[in-house]
Amino acid sequence: ALGYQACFQETQEAAVMGSRHLNAFIDGDGIVTQWPTKSDARVQILAYLAHKFELTRVYSEPEVNEVLKRWHTFGDWPLLRRELVEHGYLERDRAGREYRVGNFFDQLRPRSYAEAVLKWAQSGTALEIGAYLGNNAVFLADHGFKVTAIEPERKWLEDHRSLLRGRDDIEVVQADMLSYTPDRQFDVVVCTMVLHFLEAEEIDDALAKLRALVAPGGCLVVASYVDGQKLPEGYRYQFPAGALRERFEDWDVMYYDELAPHRPAGVTVYKSARLIARRLL
């Protein structure tokens, strides 16, 4: 079975290769043949190329160049190397001698607050709601949990089932959180960056569903956007400041913050509320 890093490398590469507007820039062998003129396509090409680097390896500049030479044909690896650094996909030390995959490139990694829940829960059953790339689901399975991952979008669902074939510790289900009605509760429930897709009148039902899904003594991980921001189109709900924590005042709240993560200059970020809480016995 694939570990979570390899799993997400393949998932994100498949997502990029499946984007129709990138077909003009990547050939059938996965080689980048042109540098796009539009910024959104450039960013997707950079994300694709960044997946060619190993997460934990330190590279010299000549080694970075060799990777880039292997995966493009238009002969401008200095441009690609510079763009990867400027967009945060690669980090370079001050001397310019060492490169590594950047912290910005977090789609390969589980959310930090999903990792943190291991302080309070080490085994049992887990549910990830809105699995997307599945980074949290695979991370929890790799740490001993029996995981159910629900995802409403067919494209991501099909990617999960293909990549996780042969694993018996992750069940993938097509469902959204409001319609999902399992016959059991879970020791850990993870719901990160999902609630903003709901309408305001749906939030009470969604939070009631989250509370009901967690077994007594179990942990809930929630992250969602907070008020005062202009979010992208299709993002509907933002919690008022402090409101997410207030909704779980009768639980044991182990962690809560409302922060905007650090990102390179020029990259848009959004402030989110992040909560880890335990349901009382």
Image (cartoon, rainbow, N blue to C red):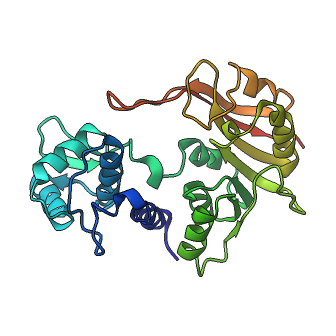
Residue 91, can we see it? no
277 in relation to 111, above or below:
above
Number of numbered discs: 0
Above or below for 242 versus 47: above
Give whichever of 281, 150 is nearer the camera: 150
The reply, left or right, for residue 280 in relation to residue 15 is right
Residue at 24% in and 42% down: 85
Q: Is residue 90 visible?
A: yes
Nearest the eye: 195 or 1: 195
Quadrant of residue 104 within the rendered picture? top left
Q: Residue 271 appears at what percent x and percent y?
A: 55, 26
The residue most toward the bottom is 166
Residue at screen point 70% across, 39% down: 195
Displayed quadrant of residue 113: top right
Q: Position of residue 96 (x, y in %)?
A: 12, 41
Q: Is residue 24 above or below residue 250?
A: below
Left or right, 273 with respect to 33, comes to right
Which of the 4 image quadrants contains residue 82? top left
At which x and y percent is residue 224?
A: 65, 34
Q: Quadrant of the C terminus?
A: top right
Tell me what residue is drawn at x 70 percent, y 25 percent.
Answer: 239
Q: Is residue 154 left or right of residue 47?
A: right
Residue 221's x, y, as percent? 69, 42
